[in-house]
Structures are given as structure tokens and as C-alpha cells.
């Protein structure tokens, strides 16, 4: 009898926890860091289409397309400047990180240091949920990473470590090669050992980074995603 009662209590507790998480995961206002990059722009468009209130964090507001400028709140700043990051996170429900290097492959710590500033601001502002675009090269053994991508991959690894150790509800997305192809059916795997495929559309990646914020099943996890191969 005691075992049955314990099972019932466990089930009820699990249901209540899921309900509570679902309530917490309702996103109304988000900030997107790296809003003018290839993936960041797609995330902004996806968030606008979902009728979210969107704050676009940019270094150069001129790079934001005209059709989006009147649909988002633009914050001009630099992720390496904690004050501007803190301002951007004030009052939001979730955060999307799409930091990049404009295809510069030189050694850098800008992405990881920026991520640390975002994490600190989230803690200070009591914002719990963050999705981040990293790289499928993080699935590789270090010796297998193509030499020209080693330095960027090292900073992506530092980004992941900062997210993992943050205590936040992070979603670490490891996309494969990002294409400009139209949206297509794609696969999503939670904590896979390898990437589920070779490519992902920038439109699908941007959309997933936004949608995942409202899905507790993706919290505190590494996400592999890729376009489904032709039948």
C-alpha cells in the first residue's frame, strides 16, 4: 500500500512539475544577440512571425533590414560591454545567442566572453532560459576538427562550458553546415553522440532557436538537428 501511495505521489508531483514548467516556458518577450548575422536574422524573423515582442541586440543597426526595423526594439551595443548586455536583458522572458565572427577564423574569445556577460546579466535579472547556436564540430574528437576551424571550435567549447556551468535552463544547439536553402523537414535529437545529419537550413535553425525556449524537454541539453535526407 505504501509503495502504491508513493507511486501516486510521484506521478502527481511529476505532473505538477510539468505544468509549472510549461507555465514558466511561455515566452512573450525575448532578446536575440547577434541579430544581424545569417542565423540571427532568421531567428528574429521567426520570433516576429510568432508574435513575440523581440529585442534585437546589434552592433550596427544599419545592418538590420528595413522590413524588420519597425517590428523589433533595437538595442545597439557590444556583448563585451556588460552594461549594454544588462540593458538588453532587462524585462525579457528568454534569450537567444547567435554570436559569430563574420567568417573570420582567427583565434578569439569574443563569443565565449560575450556569452559569460549574457549569463551574468541573466542571473542578475532572474531570466532563466537561453538557447545558443554553437557548432556540430563539438561532436568531433579534437584531433578530427578541420585545422582551419580549430580556433573557432575552441571558443564554441568555452561557450558551451559557460552555459553548462551557468545553472540556467540552457539549450546548446550544435548545427551542422548551415545552408541558405528553403525550410525543410528536419530531425531533432537530444544529447546525441554525433550530429544527426550534414546540413540544416538557416531558416529552420533560426526558428528552432526561438521555439526551443518554450520547450522544457530541451532544457539543460545538447541538441543535434539536421535536415532529413530524401526518402
Image (cartoon, helix red, strand yellow):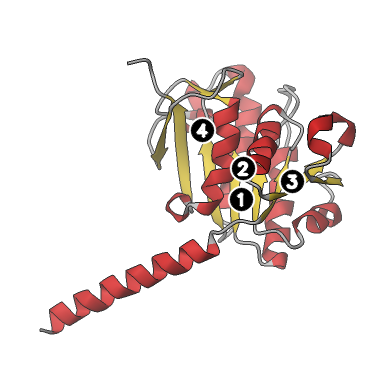
Q: Earlier in the sequence, mark 4 or mark 2?
A: 4
Residue at (51% x, 33% y) in the render? 138
- Residue 32 rendering spot, x and y as whole percentages: 71, 44
The residue indicated by pointer 1 is 162
The residue indicated by pointer 2 is 158
Q: In screen coordinates, is 199 left or right of 31?
A: left
Q: Earlier in the sequence, mark 3 or mark 2?
A: 3
- Residue 87 rendering spot, x and y as whole percentages: 82, 57
Q: In screen coordinates, is 54 left or right of 173?
A: right
Q: 135 or 47: which is nearer to us?
A: 47
Residue at (61% x, 50% y) in the render? 162
As drawn, the label of residue 78 is none
Labels 4 and 2 touching (C-beta < 8 A) = no
Residue at (65% x, 31% y) in the render? 39
Labels 1 and 3 touching (C-beta < 8 A) = no
- Residue 41 rendering spot, x and y as whole percentages: 71, 32
Q: Earlier in the sequence, mark 1 or mark 4?
A: 4
Spatial separation of the CA atoms under disc 2 and disc 1: 6 Å
As drawn, the label of residue 114 is 3
Q: Give the number of callouts.
A: 4
Quadrant showing the N terminus: bottom left
Instruction: Work out whether 4 lies above or below 80.
Output: below
Spatial separation of the CA atoms under disc 1 and disc 4: 14 Å
Labels 2 and 1 touching (C-beta < 8 A) = yes
Residue at (56% x, 32% y) in the render? 205
Disc 3 versus disc 2: nearer the observer: 3
Quarter-wise, where is residue 29 in the image?
A: bottom right
- Residue 60 rendering spot, x and y as whole percentages: 88, 35
Amino acid at each position: 500500500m505504501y509503495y502504491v501511495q508513493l507511486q501516486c505521489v510521484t506521478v502527481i508531483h511529476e505532473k505538477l512539475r510539468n505544468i509549472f514548467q510549461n507555465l514558466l516556458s511561455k515566452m512573450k518577450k525575448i532578446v536575440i544577440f547577434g541579430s544581424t548575422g545569417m542565423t540571427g536574422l532568421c531567428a528574429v524573423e521567426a520570433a516576429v512571425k510568432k508574435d513575440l515582442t523581440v529585442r534585437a541586440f546589434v552592433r550596427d543597426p544599419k545592418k538590420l533590414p528595413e522590413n524588420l526595423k519597425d517590428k523589433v526594439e533595437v538595442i545597439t551595443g557590444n556583448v563585451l560591454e556588460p552594461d549594454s548586455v544588462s540593458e538588453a536583458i532587462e524585462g525579457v522572458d528568454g534569450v537567444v545567442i547567435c554570436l559569430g565572427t563574420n567568417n573570420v577564423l582567427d583565434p578569439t574569445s569574443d563569443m565565449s566572453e560575450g556569452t559569460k556577460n549574457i549569463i551574468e546579466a541573466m542571473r542578475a535579472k532572474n531570466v532563466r532560459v537561453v538557447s545558443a547556436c554553437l557548432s556540430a564540430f563539438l561532436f568531433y574528437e579534437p584531433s578530427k576538427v578541420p585545422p582551419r576551424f580549430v580556433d573557432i571550435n575552441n571558443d564554441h567549447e568555452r561557450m558551451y562550458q559557460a552555459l553548462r556551468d551557468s545553472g540556467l535552463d540552457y539549450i546548446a544547439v550544435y548545427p551542422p553546415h548551415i545552408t541558405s536553402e528553403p525550410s525543410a523537414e528536419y530531425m531533432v535529437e537530444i544529447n546525441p553522440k554525433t550530429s544527426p545529419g550534414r546540413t540544416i537550413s538557416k531558416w529552420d535553425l533560426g526558428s528552432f532557436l526561438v521555439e526551443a525556449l518554450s520547450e522544457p524537454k530541451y532544457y539543460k541539453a545538447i541538441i543535434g538537428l539536421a535536415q532529413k535526407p530524401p526518402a
